Image (spheres, coloured by chain):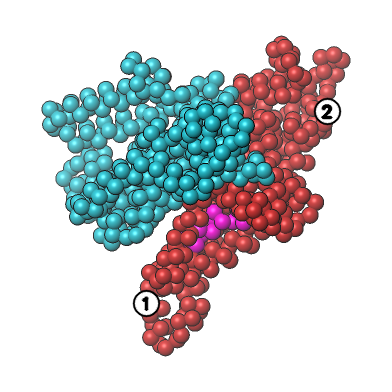
Chain colours: A red, B cyan
Amino acid sequence: MLSFIARRIGTILLTMLCLTLVVFFLVNLEPNLKKLAISQTEMHTPPEQLESWLVNHGYRQNFFVRYGHWLGVLKMEPMVDPATGKPSQRFSFCNDPVEPAYSGVLQGNFGCSTKFKTTVAAKLFPALRATGILMFWVLVVMVPVSLLIGILAGMREGSRTDRILSVASIATTATPEYVSGVIFTVIFASWLGWLNGSAASAAQGITFYNFTLPVITLAIYGIGYIARMTRASMVEVMTQQYIRTARLKGLSFSSVVMKHALRNALIAPFTVIMLQFPWLLTGVVIVETMFRYQGFGYTLVEAAGNNDIDLLLGCSLVSVFIVLITQLISDVGYAYLNPRIRVQ
Amino acid sequence: MQIEYIGAFNIIVGVLVQFWPVWLAQAIVLGASFAYKKRLGLYGQLFDSSVGIAGVVICLFWLFTAIFASTVAPFDPLAQIPVMKDALPGAIEPASKGVFLFGGDKLARDIFSRMVYGSQIVLIIAPAATGFALMVGITLGLPAGYYGGKIDTVLSFLANLVLAFPVILLFYLLVTPGIMDTPIPYGMAGLFFLFPIIFFCTLFWTRYKNRPDRLYLLLGLTLVLGGWIYIGLVFDADPLRIVHIDPNQLNIFVAVVFASSPGVFRIVRGLTMDIKTRDYVAAAQTRGETPWYIMLWEILPNARGPLIVDACLRIGYTTILLGTLGYFGLGLAPESPDWGTAIKDASRLLRSFIHPALPPTIALMSFVLGLNLLADSLREQSMKD
């Protein structure tokens, strides 16, 4: 088991290395660097000055050398100010070392955000915290509701409850966040006026009024999927011999479901819930943009829109890490919950 | 100037009347399907359940809407008629006396016509991109599952690499105006569009290699047709000017294929690993068939059930992805009538007007719902066999 986890963590690290290299390559394409230079200098700057801005800020060094700097395996030389000839910081708004030093992700320095004029860490971690709060409430809503729907539907396969709940869960999986968000806003904010169509004020304090719409919008897309998986698992368990035995012993239907079926039926949904995180990540980006909630998704959109290289790399590192770590947890957890499956 | 309106009942009747070619085509197809239900195999069995019928009806509705878009839509989707800015549903356009059935948007265009034309974009890109993703996934998934070993390790690692990318980040990196100046989209298109040609050539080669008369005809046909479309799509140099794709559409297309082929790869790989243990595969191996013959003519036909279901779901998912691209304003032109762009434009004005938001959202939702119902019913029918 331990060697399995160790091997998986090795794969995760390798994957992260490859992916950050790909992202690094894509954000450093010539048109993207031009875009960055144009957005960082004043309007109508002549091309030569754009070029010199790129040179002065170190964007013209060798690609792999810069990747090494970012990663922290190569020593970062400070920029030399052309006017004074003294070593200077790359950006005045974040504390790059003025002596040559290893200063990259491995040392805990995520770099500078050119868009927000601060360090990446100062921007990224509060945003992650905000998204964490959102995710917490989404899971609080999504998991019990979807499990309940799945169990009710799968308890008696083919019954009317099953049909209705199945079609309802198919319908929610056909409704992406930007569709359900619009529909909910129309109904609850524009028409009934019960809820706020913007979550911008949630940064000061979360209330039912400003936080419900983003939470249900995010939850609803996942509910259908998890409910269907729970249903399938429940249907399978209900046809097992031990359930029939329990019924024939004379136990009531409800106690068979509660005591015998439920525990075995909940193993598969656990994996599915874990694997929902990558999907939720895309949903978070949509919902945070739509409801103007300043979290991770909003930061990612801003970073990508302005080609904020270090911030975008930080965002991709975080999201890839989340995707891979949830995969690992789901595999390990599955083996742990289901004694019939043992990892080789 | 005072704009006149028609009532709610007249709007509903007007919409139903506008869709007349769709109803007609649907009546013909459904009538024929019911009449010959017994002979149509899996497709005919769909008509045994109400879920299946609902799925077929919704999918056919959007298919015919896309085909007959120019007849169904009363106005040009891009034409702006200033007096109709933010007009409410049922407003009568003064010049032509035509009705803006679902009202006008903030740029004074007819929402109904835009919704109808939006279906064209979705129904061309989503199935085509899914088709290409299937080709890529099958061509790589079969050997990975069949041979296992190093090929499998390398290909699976690459697939997991792409799958570990959150889709939205992938799109922000791959679908930008800047990337069109670099050779990346064209290189990727050149790579992906090669797969169907390779696939069909191997398919025919393995089957007919001892019957040259058939083989050369089929190979020639594949190479000519495939090469023609390939040149048209990748280099935009079709000598007859029929096959053509805008650079930004090519960019979207490539990104969507890139994002969804690893999923197909995983499914095909899993199915292959399962099917290769069956007796008929062992029989073919004993007969001395080549590995590629076994993969393409023994394993693939037996994996078709789950693959058809997955293709249905995947077209729906690709539709959602296209909507996401439109919602973030990536790739598609800002005035494009596709549903995602329409939802983006409308959702910013929800406080003042809600009517521009509803038609594209409901259109997108119903189409994906139809595909999901279809997939669900196909799965149930294929499990009965």
Instruction: Give the residue at x 82% y 18%.
Output: A81
Q: Residue at x 60, y 40 (%)?
A: B346
Quarter of the figure with the N terminus of chain B? top right
The image position of residue B310, as x and y in percent, is: 38, 48
- Give whichever of discs 1 and 2 has the lower sequence position: 2
Task: Describe residue A223's horizontal placement relative to residue B237 as left or right.
Answer: right
Query: Dot 2 surroundings within 10 Å: few (below 14), some, or many (20 or more)?
Result: few
Q: Nearer the viewer, residue B258 or B361?
A: B361
Q: Which residue appears at 15% of the width and 30% of the height?
A: B214
Q: For this rendering, which residue is in front, B136 or B345?
A: B345
Q: Which image quadrant is residue A243 in?
A: bottom left
Say if labels 1 and 2 share a chain: yes
Q: Chain of mark 1?
A: A
Could you tell me the amino acid type at mark 1?
A: Gln
Q: How many marks?
A: 2
Circle 2 SS class: loop
x and y percentages locating residue A69 in the rendered image: 69, 30
Tag 2: residue type? Ser
Residue for badge 2: A92
Res A184 visible = yes
- Mark 2 belongs to chain: A
Task: Give how far apart the Cα atoms at labels 1 and 2 are.
Answer: 71 Å
Residue B183 on image: x %, y %: 50, 21
Quadrant (top left/top right/bottom left/bottom right) for the C terminus of chain B: bottom left
State left or right for residue B52 relative to residue A50.
left
Task: Give whichever of A177, A314 is nearer the camera.
Answer: A177
| Residue beneath disc 1 | A241
Residue at coordinates 41% horizontally, 45% vertically from top-left? B16
Q: Which residues are magenta?
A: A215-230
